[in-house]
Image (cartoon, helix red, strand yellow):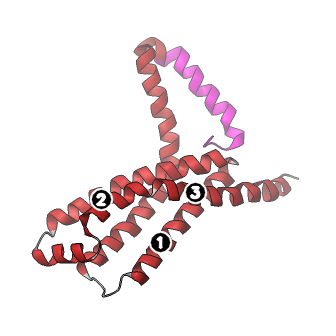
Amino acid sequence: MLLKPEDRESVSGDLLEEYRESVCPSRGRAGADLWYVGQVTGFLWRAAWPWGVLFSASFVGRTALDWFDPPADFRMRATVTTYTAVSLFVAAGFWAAWRARSLGAAALTAIGTSIIAAIVSISSALVMLAIWHDPQTFGAIDHSGGLGEVFTLPLFVIVPGTVCALVGGIVGRIAASVFRSHAVE
């Protein structure tokens, strides 16, 4: 689903052949199944990591600004961050659907992006908190929504992020059908 249509059959066949001929005899059924899941996860990782890192950079940058340069009113920052997140997920969905010509690829890429972003964002916030944990920083954290927001928001992005990616995926799928079919002719 995450592969280009022209690569799906050959890559799937190669994985199945290696699974049957090499991996299963040497690792047993359970080990071979784990190997296969790892291979498929690798495809998801390669599709999602750039988007996850971009989202994390946006989130961690916003968190750092809130902690170290807190504004009197957070509306502008909230608006910019929200539009940035929506744009990243729409773009990720568009790209995945354009490449794979599949809405499923858009959804899977969004889920992978969300998981990667949550891990990187929460880890980065923990590192910042370990370095800067003075009363002034904690005051800014409390004023900006608290630690609960910092550590739960990345986890809650998965559903709205997937919806946004599906919107981008619909456009990407249509665009791929229109423009790629003309390029072949």
Going by the picture, which residue comes out furthest to the bottom? 72
Where does the image place residue 59, in percent across and percent down from the top left? Answer: 38, 67
Q: Which of 87/38 is in front?
A: 87
Which residue, given by chain and number where applicable, does mark 2 sit on? 151
Q: Is residue 30 above or below residue 110?
A: above
Examine the structure image and report whether residue 130 is included in the region drawn in magenta: no
Q: Residues within 10 Å of mark 2 (few under 14, many from 20)?
A: some
Q: Is residue 119 above or below residue 147?
A: above
Q: Which residue is mark 1?
A: 82
Magenta-highlighted residues: 1-23
Q: Which residue is mark 3?
A: 163
Q: Residue at x 51, y 73 (%)?
A: 83
From the viewer's perspective, tell me whether residue 154 is left or right of residue 178: left
Q: State if disc 1 and disc 3 touch (CB < 8 Å).
A: no
Name the one closer to the observer, 5 or 160: 160
Amino acid marked by disc 1: Thr
> Distance from label 2 to label 3 (Cα)?
22 Å
Left/right placement of residue 173 relative to residue 88 reads: right
Residue 17 drawn in magenta: yes
